[in-house]
Amino acid sequence: MKNIWKLVFSLAFTLCLIICFDTSEISPVINTENDVNLPILMYHKISENSKSWGKYCISPAEFENDIKLILKRGFTPITISDLENHKNGKSPLPEKPIMLTFDDGNHSDYTFAYPLALKYKIKFVSSTVGAYPEEYKGGHVYLSWEEMREMEKSGLVEFQNHSYNLHNFSSHRKGALKSSTEEDDAYIALISNDLSVSQKLFAENGLRVPTCFTYPFGMRDDTLLKLIKEAGFTSTLGTYARMNVIGEDLFDLKRFNREHNYDIGKILDLAE
């Protein structure tokens, strides 16, 4: 019986990820004259090991080819700060904006994505799990605070919050969502503490304090969003594969997962 429940849970988890990250069917975008289309690409890991390539890992060459195509098509990579400055009337967006985002803070952000950002002078956003720099210290699995400071100082990389330590998916808790057996007060305290600890770590390690929360596994509900807003965040990144039409609300921004052997040209077509 125990094995059956494990199988059921595994199938449910897989289905959830397919729904959240699927890019096989991209819906058309209907705009008014003043709307701004913003495609956001979601990357996870870059590796030279072909055995790692798949839904959440691509090769260095694939990422470089993405950059070349983006620039050739006249798109300009922006950050969350650029988007928020546009919303607040501080600065306009480029004519054809696009956002490149990396989740989890994998070390490949530093070894592969960052050098290419420097080479082509393009920006990207990295959403990091606050506990990882210390938990995996010296292992070159996830970014260190020192590497993050170097990247941020370049002016090309912006870091955002992917929770302090809620990047887990189990029968007890799915990402940052409330568990079925959890009391409301306990859940509120958990989320408030997680967000607070993570934000303080960024500040204590000499980094800009994030303004955007990236949902672990894309899992969100109205209760979580309310707590995120109360914590002072002004935007969130999700995982639904849709085009963003930028208006007043920067919460629940949608992203297209960039998996191995995927042609991002189809996404760029939608934005033009």
Image (cartoon, grey):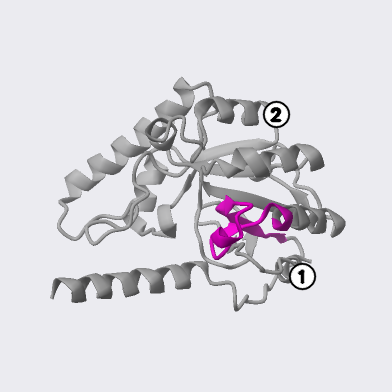
Image side of residue 70 versus residue 209, left or right: right
Q: Nearer the viewer, residue 248 or 159?
A: 159
The three-letter amino acid code for the residue at tag 1 is Asp
Q: Is residue 49 magenta?
A: yes
Q: Is disc 2 placed on a helix, strand or loop?
A: loop
**Residue 179 location, x and y as percent?**
22, 57
**Residue 216 location, x and y as percent?**
41, 52
63 shown above or below 30: above
Q: Is residue 45 visible?
A: yes
What whole-number distance in Å separates the C-alpha atoms at marks 1 and 2?
30 Å
Residue positioned 55% across, 56% down in the render: 253
Residue positioned 67% across, 76% down in the render: 28
Image side of residue 127 versus residue 120, left or right: left
**Residue 144 location, x and y as percent?**
51, 30
Q: Quadrant of residue 223?
A: bottom left
**Residue 237 location, x and y as percent?**
52, 53
The three-letter amino acid code for the residue at tag 2 is Ser
Image side of residue 186 versus residue 82, left or right: left
Residue positioned 46% across, 73% down in the render: 19
Q: Nearer the viewer, residue 8 or 22?
A: 8
173 shown above or below 30: above
Q: Which mark is residue 167?
A: none
Q: Is residue 255 visible?
A: no
Label 2, on which residue?
Answer: 154
Label 1, on which residue?
Answer: 269
Q: Is residue 6 magenta?
A: no
Earlier in the chain: of badge 1 and badge 2, it is 2
174 shown above or below 3: above
Q: Is disc 1 placed on a helix, strand or loop?
A: helix
Image: magenta residue range: 35-62
Residue positioned 71% across, 69% down in the render: 263
